Amino acid sequence: LRNGRGAGPYGSGLMAVGAPYLHDLIIEDCSADHAIYGIGLYVRGGATLIDCVLRNNRSSAAGSEGGGAWLMGTWEAELTVENLDVYGNEAAHGSGIHFNDRFGYFAGVYCLDNLGDGMVVYNGAVNGTGPIIEYSLFESNSGAGIAYDADLIIRSCTFVGNGTATGGAAIDGGSSWDFTLDPRITQCIVAYNKGPGIRG
């Protein structure tokens, strides 16, 4: 999909609700000049994304979320993402990926050179549960590699070259009155980032 222009608040490139199976797609060069969720891809439900590319999807409008993708799982069926390249995307929040729930599994995500945070995880869960992110690379994003305001599990991931000297950490925990922050970060490499490595 190329050159999508957002007209409404959701998905200028591809919008899916339910449990679609998305395989071997390239979604690129979608844009919006207003606040939008999911400039390249908007998915809500138990979707499966495998071997896809999200690149150069952009909106700098205040309130935009998910330059590459805005994703949300459901308790009936968690969202599954494997082998996803996410680069050159931009949004006010979650330039690469904005994930908004606890029911998600991410493996083999390569999140590179996004103009802001590589991935944002919000509204995860409680008691140290939440989405799982593993075997993934977050490199040279101009914000955090992963910014979270939720519980989540990060394991066997690499974070290198993210952030700025005055910006967020490579793995950057926020705070919220309604969500606890009990991440589990194990067996990761966090090196050569431009700001702090891990901040909670």
Image (spheres, grey):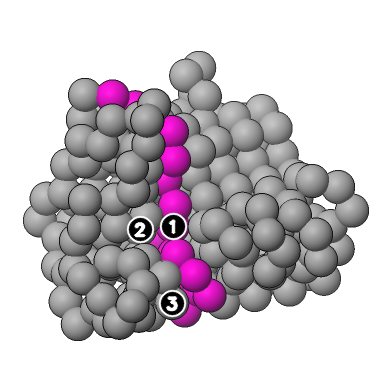
- Asked if marks 2 and 1 touch (Cβ < 8 Å), the reply is yes
Determine whether the residue tagged by mark 1 lies in a helix, strand or loop.
Answer: strand
Residue at the spot x=19%, y=61% of the render? 198
Q: Which quarter of the rendering shows the N terminus?
A: bottom right
Quadrant of the rendered image containing residue 162: bottom left
Residue 27: give x, y in percent of width and height: 68, 64
**Which of the labelled discs sits on residue 119, or is there none?**
1
Q: Which residues are magenta?
A: 109-126
Q: Is residue 124 magenta?
A: yes
Q: Which residue is mark 3?
A: 142
- Say left or right for 184 vs 2: left
Q: Height in image: 171 above or below 192?
A: above
Q: Height in image: 134 above or below 124?
A: below
Front position among marks 1 and 3: 3
Q: Amino acid at mark 1?
A: Met
Mark 1 burial class by Cα count in 10 Å: few <14, some 14-19, many 20+? many
Q: Is residue 85 visible?
A: no
| Residue at the outermost top position | 76
